[in-house]
Image: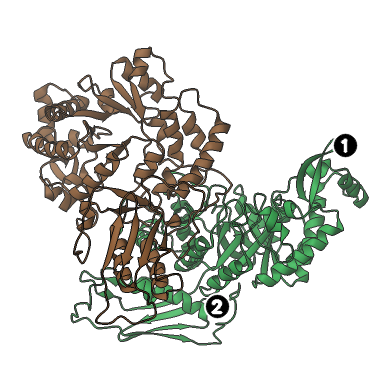
């Protein structure tokens, strides 16, 4: 996963099996479990046990504490911990060090004892050693047990979001590491060595999300938005034509070939097993018909099928076939609104995601149409957080009422919620967190709280305070307006 | 620069495969004239340099240390790693100097406090982009984080909190860090408007507003009719001029609201007495002139926002006018320079005005000399400043909001006016952005794509 300079709670594995595997050199004795604890750099300290022979002033350890502090948290600034803040149940705010034998000013020798015991569980975070040399070894092991959690999940949990809609691949790149079709990743990713999500990465995200009650909804968008799939699967995309000759460029997935559906069968078999949620997002948005129109084989197919010149029917044909494939794997699906707008025949339990603000109708009207037809709806149109403007736009975001459309109570019940979208054209780890938070918080309250909770003054007061709390918890949330937080953000 | 160049390759692949390519062993740096190493940079500092890269010794020559700094940055940008990981540089010959001598970034530490680390990081990024002025809008309505030795209550009462303060040490750290990068630090103590926070620690400084005959408990701009005002300002600016070594101080003078002055009976009396009638611009003028005199007394040049010129304040020759209002800014430039005053352009470069998409192109297309005027007038354009006002900006989002958008302005202010091809700029800027990221500056992406690390 992309490296990040963002500051997030670190995790101390007690140790997580996968993480313990990263220890080097391997300890003489190690017992691990799945349990892990959060560490907040601003609040964490290395401490000497009161019975320790080594105490502050012991230069070997004083300096080691500073070194490991820098290594772990890359920061020279350290704030004294707030004495009044309650510790979260699964948080460690100190490593207590007890050295048995005095002796800070000697040199290590052949006979030096370097053994140590590191105990990390619900009750302790404790390093016991014979000598300061053992303490050093234990500190090193401790530092290897600390790791950084995946981006953003914690922030989502703080806001009670419960779905991580992962738009994994698109035209620009294919970072998902497919085991059935490794060429997809090798040829489609920006850099197959560094810019990919391995099976391990994906598992970690899903588990981390699960522990926070967050579902991972994976999206593999087709037939449009698939340029990056082409290099790894020759013949998958439609060759565009310039007159009677191929132009060398490619368009959406080719809907007329059996090989396409064979590929999709195998690919979605993998996807269905990798992603445990019942739902998969199958995309279906913004299919550009120009390339299909230009291709003579497709033109013939259109004639054969009696579609005339209505390419929406061809799109429909593709999507229906795909939906059948995915249904056979016992998955439900979410699709973008074009699938509904273009009258594709979908199963009644399909979820339609509304993203377009004005076309073909205003999104409020779209919600009405979708629910009238009996489908469940997800609202995103007014919540495109990648659309930035000057000033506090959180209030417009907040004042959206998802059920504000003409419809019966039964219709309204079909609106299962919404999603804040952060499309990535102009976003990566350098600016994701401040762009997402706290603005997404406005969406979060709208989707969680009662419909009547709409007082902007109260919301502003609470959200400003919450933003400071997010900062304290390590989320790089940007300011809502002028002001300050007790503890400002400092890059670690 | 050694760190910037060679720490790019974090995997430390060991001694690179020594193929038959020739090795560049040294960069020899020669400063021809008196280096000015121990001095502070100023607006006339010579930033020119020449760089000849030819094995085995590359040669960086500059008149002053300021040019050497610029040349080192360029040199560091010429180095890349080939497919084996070998650090490589092409032979070349560069003669370079800036088009404009004043190339600045405005930061606002009053709307939001910026930790020192954030300011130092900005200075690093500025050096990577050859910016040479940090315009530090240090105090304003919302807070007064500058710790004054003469008037400690200003920050005691006016800062957001006692930990949201810049101590004299902090300020000195910024100034020295900047100096080592050839960057001037110009402080702005904006008045008479934008001073609400000053009133918290300095009683009777601000104008008490009136509701009819009663005081309304609110305050307006600095009270221009009291002697105590000017004695306070004298002492404050005496201190400020000692703390900040740059030859110039920014005195602000923007957006003065007249309503409070109009409501105050003593001020109305003063207006009558002075024969100003109902023209409060004259009162503003009266105040600003006195502040300009104070600046003069402490031997500093003055920079002011354009209202001071627009409202016909009598300005000393050499006072620099900063043009910030977007509407008709070219005409404004023409008028200011026609009147003989130097100009700093900011109007098209308000980086706090974010929008969706590649707005860097708009910043890049601006030409600071694109107004009707004689060559002498054009010579009065000292350069420009990208402004990042702090209403919605603090350390959480400052860096991605500033960079690489400000980089487009950096090139516009340094390079020749002919350098304007957007496609070429895009190709170079994407690489430059990745370079900034690898040097620890969280510059946001220009568009879809990736960096090689």
- Residue A19: x and y in percent read 23, 55
Q: In the picture shown, does residue A171 fall above or below B114?
A: above
Q: In the picture shown, does residue A186 fall above or below A348?
A: below
Is disc 1 placed on a helix, strand or loop? loop
Name the residue beneath numbered marker 1: B213
Say which chain tag 1 marks.
B
Res A390 seen here:
yes
Of residues A361 and A295, the one nearer the viewer is: A361
Q: Residues within 10 Å of mark 2 (few under 14, many from 20)?
A: some
- Left or right, residue A65 beside residue A466: left
Identify the disc placed on residue B46: 2
Q: Residue at x 32, y 69 (%)?
A: A135
Q: Residue at x 85, y 35 (%)?
A: B212
Is disc 2 placed on a helix, strand or loop? loop
Which of pointers 1 and 2 indicates the residue nearer the eye?
Answer: 1
Quadrant location of the C terminus of chain B in the rendered image: bottom left
Res B453 seen here:
no
- Spatial CA span between label 1 and label 2: 59 Å
Q: In the picture shown, does residue A189 fall above or below A453?
A: below
């Amino acid at each position: 996963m992309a490296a990040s300079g963002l500051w997030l709670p670190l995790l101390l594995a007690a140790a997580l099996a996968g993480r313990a595997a990263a220890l080097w050199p391997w300890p003489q004795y190690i017992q691990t479990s799945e349990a892990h604890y959060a560490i907040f750099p601003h609040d964490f300290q290395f401490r000497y046990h009161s019975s320790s022979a080594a105490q502050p002033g012991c230069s070997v350890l004083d300096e080691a504490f500073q070194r490991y502090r820098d290594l772990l948290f890359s920061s020279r600034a350290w704030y004294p911990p707030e004495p009044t803040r309650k510790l979260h149940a699964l948080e460690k705010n100190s490593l207590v060090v007890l050295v048995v034998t005095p002796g800070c000013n000697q040199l290590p020798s052949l006979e030096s004892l370097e053994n140590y015991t590191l105990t990390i569980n619900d009750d302790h975070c404790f390093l016991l050693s014979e000598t300061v040399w053992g303490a050093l070894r234990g500190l090193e092991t401790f530092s290897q047990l600390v790791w950084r959690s995946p981006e953003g999940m914690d922030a989502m949990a703080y806001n009670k979001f419960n779905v991580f809609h992962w738009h994994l691949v698109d035209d620009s790149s294919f970072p998902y590491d497919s085991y059935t079709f490794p060429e997809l990743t090798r040829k489609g990713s920006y850099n197959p060595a560094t810019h990919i999500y391995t099976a391990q990465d994906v598992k970690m995200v899903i588990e981390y999300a699960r522990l926070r009650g967050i579902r991972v909804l994976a999206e593999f968008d087709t037939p449009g938005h698939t340029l990056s799939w082409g290099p790894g699967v020759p013949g998958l995309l439609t060759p565009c034509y310039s007159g009677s000759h191929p132009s060398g460029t490619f368009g959406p997935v080719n809907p007329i070939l059996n090989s396409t559906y064979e590929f999709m069968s195998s690919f979605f078999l993998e996807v269905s097993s990798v992603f445990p949620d019942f739902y998969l997002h199958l995309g279906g948005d913004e299919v550009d018909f120009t390339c299909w129109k230009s291709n003579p084989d497709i033109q013939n197919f259109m004639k054969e099928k009696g579609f005339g010149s209505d390419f929406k029917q061809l799109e429909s044909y593709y999507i229906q076939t795909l939906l059948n494939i995915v249904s056979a794997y016992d998955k439900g699906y979410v699709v973008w609104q074009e699938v509904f707008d273009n009258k594709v025949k979908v199963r009644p339990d399909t979820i339609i995601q509304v993203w377009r603000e004005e076309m073909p109708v205003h999104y409020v009207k779209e919600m009405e149409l979708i629910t009238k037809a009996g489908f469940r709806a997800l609202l995103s149109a007014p919540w495109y957080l990648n659309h930035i403007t000057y000033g506090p736009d959180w209030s417009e975001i907040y004042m959206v009422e998802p059920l504000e459309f003409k419809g019966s109570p039964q219709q309204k019940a079909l609106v299962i919620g919404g999603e804040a979208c952060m499309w990535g054209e102009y976003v990566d780890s350098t600016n994701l967190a401040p762009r997402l938070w706290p603005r997404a918080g406005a969406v979060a309250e709208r989707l969680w709280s009662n419909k009547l909770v709409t007082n902007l003054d109260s919301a502003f007061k609470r959200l400003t305070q919450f933003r400071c709390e997010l900062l304290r918890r390590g989320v790089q949330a940007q300011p809502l307006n002028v002001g300050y937080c007790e503890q400002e953000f400092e890059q670690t | 620069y050694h760190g910037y160049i060679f720490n790019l390759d974090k995997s430390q692949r060991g001694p690179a495969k020594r193929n038959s390519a020739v090795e560049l062993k040294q960069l020899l740096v020669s400063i021809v004239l008196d280096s000015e190493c121990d001095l502070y940079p100023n607006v006339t500092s010579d930033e020119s340099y020449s760089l000849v890269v030819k094995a085995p010794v590359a040669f960086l020559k500059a008149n002053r240390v300021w040019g050497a700094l610029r040349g080192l940055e360029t040199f560091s940008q010429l180095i890349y790693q080939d497919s084996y990981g070998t650090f490589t540089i092409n032979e070349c010959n560069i003669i370079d100097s800036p088009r404009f001598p004043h190339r600045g970034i405005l930061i606002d530490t009053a709307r939001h406090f910026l930790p020192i680390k954030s300011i130092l990081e900005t200075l690093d990024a500025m050096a990577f982009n050859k910016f040479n002025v940090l315009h530090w809008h240090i105090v304003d309505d919302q807070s007064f984080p500058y710790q004054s030795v003469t008037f400690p209550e200003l920050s005691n009462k006016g800062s957001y909190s006692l930990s949201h303060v810049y101590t004299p040490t902090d300020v000195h750290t910024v100034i020295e860090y900047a100096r080592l990068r050839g960057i001037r630090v110009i402080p702005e103590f904006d008045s008479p408007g934008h001073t609400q926070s000053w009133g918290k620690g300095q009683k009777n400084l601000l104008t008490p507003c009136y509701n009819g005959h009663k005081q309304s408990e609110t305050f307006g701009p600095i009270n221009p009719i009291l002697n105590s005002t000017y004695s306070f300002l004298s002492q404050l600016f005496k201190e400020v001029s000692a703390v900040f070594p740059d030859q110039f101080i920014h005195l602000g003078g923007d957006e003065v609201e007249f309503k409070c002055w109009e409501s105050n009976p003593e001020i109305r009396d003063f207006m009558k007495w002075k024969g100003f009638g109902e023209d409060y611009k004259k009162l503003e003028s009266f105040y600003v002139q006195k502040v300009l005199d104070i600046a003069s007394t402490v031997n500093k040049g003055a920079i002011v926002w354009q209202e001071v010129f627009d409202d016909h304040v009598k300005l000393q020759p050499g006072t620099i006018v900063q043009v910030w209002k977007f509407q008709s800014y070219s005409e404004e430039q023409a008028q200011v320079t026609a009147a003989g005053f130097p100009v700093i352009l900011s109007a098209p470069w308000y980086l706090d005005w974010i929008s969706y998409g590649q707005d860097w192109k708009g910043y890049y297309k601006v030409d600071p000399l694109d107004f009707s005027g004689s060559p002498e007038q054009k010579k009065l354009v000292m350069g420009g400043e990208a402004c990042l006002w702090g209403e919605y900006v603090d350390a959480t989002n400052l860096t991605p909001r500033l960079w690489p958008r400000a980089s487009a302005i950096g090139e516009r202010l340094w390079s020749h006016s002919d350098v304007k091809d957007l496609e070429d700029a895009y190709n170079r800027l994407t690489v430059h952005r990745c370079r900034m990221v690898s040097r620890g500056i969280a510059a946001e992406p220009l568009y879809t794509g990736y960096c090689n690390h």
